[in-house]
Image (cartoon, rainbow, N blue to C red):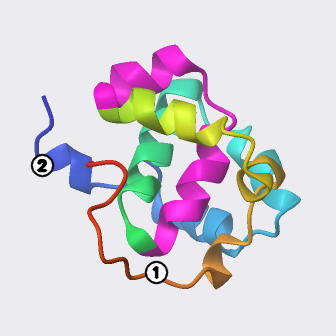
Amino acid sequence: MFGLEEDLCPVGDELFGELYRSSKQGLPVLVATVPPDTRAMLALFCYRRSHLHEMGLAIAVSCNEDDLVWSGGRAGAALFARSREGSPSAARGVAHRHSAARLTAGPPDFRF
């Protein structure tokens, strides 16, 4: 189902840079300019990378379930559910660029 295209960012470098540098309040405004299907692919792209994980969750909040599932299958469904868990950081559009990588002793919650 997934090929080499899953490693390519679904938006251009300029927009991605703007998204990455955006504030908590600015991220939802920028994300709203991205078409829904591309937004779902972007949420999955970010969520799969540890340093962009929180940004992926913040983007997924603005996605509908069908787009995430179509773009990512079971991983998209899991991301949709995770983005709606009521996490204050996901709901507010987290400070994604300041999040630290976490090391855990166990396996990850989701495989992407």
Q: Residues within 10 Å of mark 2 (few under 14, many from 20)?
A: few
Residue 89 located within the stretch drawn in magenta: no
Whole-percent x, y for residue 41 in the image: 42, 39
Q: Is residue 56 magenta?
A: yes
Predominant secondary structure in magenta? helix
Please name the residue that numbered disc 2 is placed on: 4
Mark before the other along the chain sequence, 1 or 2 = 2
Residue hosting label 1: 102
Residue 95 versus residue 73 in the image, above or below: below
Residue farthest to the top, as pictured: 66
Compared to residue 20, the image places residue 59 above or below, namely above
**Residue at (66% x, 51% y) in the render:** 58
Q: State the quadrant of the N terminus.
A: top left
Front one among 32 and 72: 72
The answer to which quarter of the image holds residue 62 is top right
Residue count near mark 1 (Cα–Cα under 10 Å), binned few <14, some 14–19, many ≥20: few
Secondary structure of residue under mark 1: loop
Rendered residue at 75%/59% (across/down):
89
